[in-house]
Amino acid sequence: QVPLVESGGGLVQAGDSLRLSCAASRLTLSSYTMGWFRQGPGKEREFVAGISGRGGITYYADSVKGRFTISRDNAKNTVSLQMSSLKPEDTAVYYCAADFTNGQLRVGFTIREYDYWGQGTQVTVSS
């Protein structure tokens, strides 16, 4: 029943890159602001990156800005997170989330704003 599925996580070394993908099964993602959140061990879920429905607006957490890039391909109904220069502190379960915004140019930063969530994909970065 979960309409979003993340993939691409894995175990990498510090400095490596990974590309996460989020695929929608029954949502038309062009109508949704999409966000990536993560939850590290013993930590609360936090905002990582967000992108508006057509990609016009993107926002990043300060901790990942310059290293991560969020993008979307509405024709394929997918959203991606390209992660570069990974650090051990990036270790977390990464979640894809969808916020129904229906054409509004906005990106939410809080968990409560998002309507749908994937089950997460684990990213582990060793030192």
Image: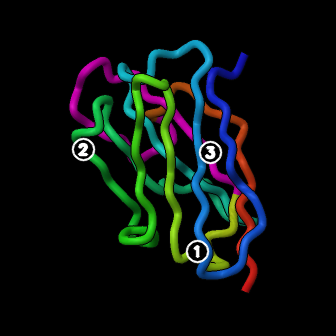
Q: How is the image coloured?
A: rainbow
Q: Amino acid at mark 3?
A: Tyr
Cβ–Cβ below 8 Å for labels 2 and 3? Answer: no
For marks 3 and 1, give the one nearer the viewer. 1
Q: Going 52% across and 16% down the picture, which residue do you hit? A: 27
Q: Is residue 95 above or below residue 84?
A: above
- The count of marks equals 3
The region drawn magenta spans: 93-112
Tell me the CA gap for discs 2 and 3: 19 Å
**78 displayed left or right of 93:** left
Q: Amino acid at mark 1?
A: Leu
Q: Which residue is mark 1?
A: 86
Cβ–Cβ below 8 Å for labels 1 and 2? Answer: no
Q: Helix or strand or loop: what does disc 3 sit on?
A: strand
Instruction: Return the residue nearer the eye: 111 or 55.
Output: 55
Q: Helix or strand or loop: what does disc 2 sit on?
A: loop
Q: Amino acid at mark 2?
A: Ile
Q: Is residue 22 above or below residue 8?
A: above
Q: Which residue is mark 3?
A: 95
